Amino acid sequence: MIRFIDGVVGAFEGGHLTRRELVERLGAFFAVAAGVAPAALAEEAEPATIASPTFQAIEVNHVALRVTDVARSREFYKKHLGLRVTSDRSPSNCFLSCGDNFLALFRNDKAGMDHYCFSIKDYEAGRAVDTLKRVGLEPERHANRVYFLDPDGLQVQVSARNDR
């Protein structure tokens, strides 16, 4: 029972359910648990709608990593994965191409994931921010870049397909 409730609330908090869908699912769950006939609920409920995704991702645009030594990491990804350097103008960052996508390396004292980016259909930064707020997420906008956190706190970016 608790696992179901946590799952539904987590889906809502993660932006995968609307407030109406959250209430409908929890209401149906508690009604069944209380012995109310599901048909009685259906008479009062509005027709269920299939939730569409907040955005439609069309590709993984890039992955950005925090690394302790940009030059060492650059050579690693060139040697072992055949990535090509597309921008290496600073000792604090480097961009390597992987087909139509790229890997970004950012100098940091602690290595780890910085963020990952999905290209989405019909991207426009202001509209993306409004959409994310509408589904209960807290986006951050930096110029034309829009970021938000996934349920585990990993930073996600959305962008246009040609945002390289």
Image (cartoon, helix red, strand yellow):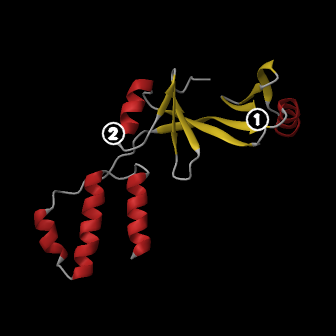
Q: Quadrant of the N terminus?
A: bottom left
Mark 1: few/some/many CA within 10 Å (<14, 14-19, 20+): some
Is residue 124 visible in this depiction of the protein?
no
Residue 24 placement: quadrant: bottom left
Residue 79, percent across and down? 89, 36
- Labelled disc at residue 134: 2
Q: Foreground residue, 120 or 64?
A: 64
Residue tagged by mark 1?
108
Question: Which residue is painted at 40% across and 38% down in the image?
Answer: 132
Residue 152 position, x and y percent, is: 56, 53
SS under mark 2 = helix
Q: Quadrant of residue 29?
A: bottom left
Residue 107 at x, y percent in the picture? 77, 31
Instruction: Compare residues 160 and 150 and report the one nearer the observer.
Output: 150
Amino acid tagged 2:
Arg
Q: Is residue 61 left or right of residue 120?
A: right
Q: Residue 67 occupies which quadrant of the picture?
A: top right
Residue 86 sits above or below residue 158 on the image: above
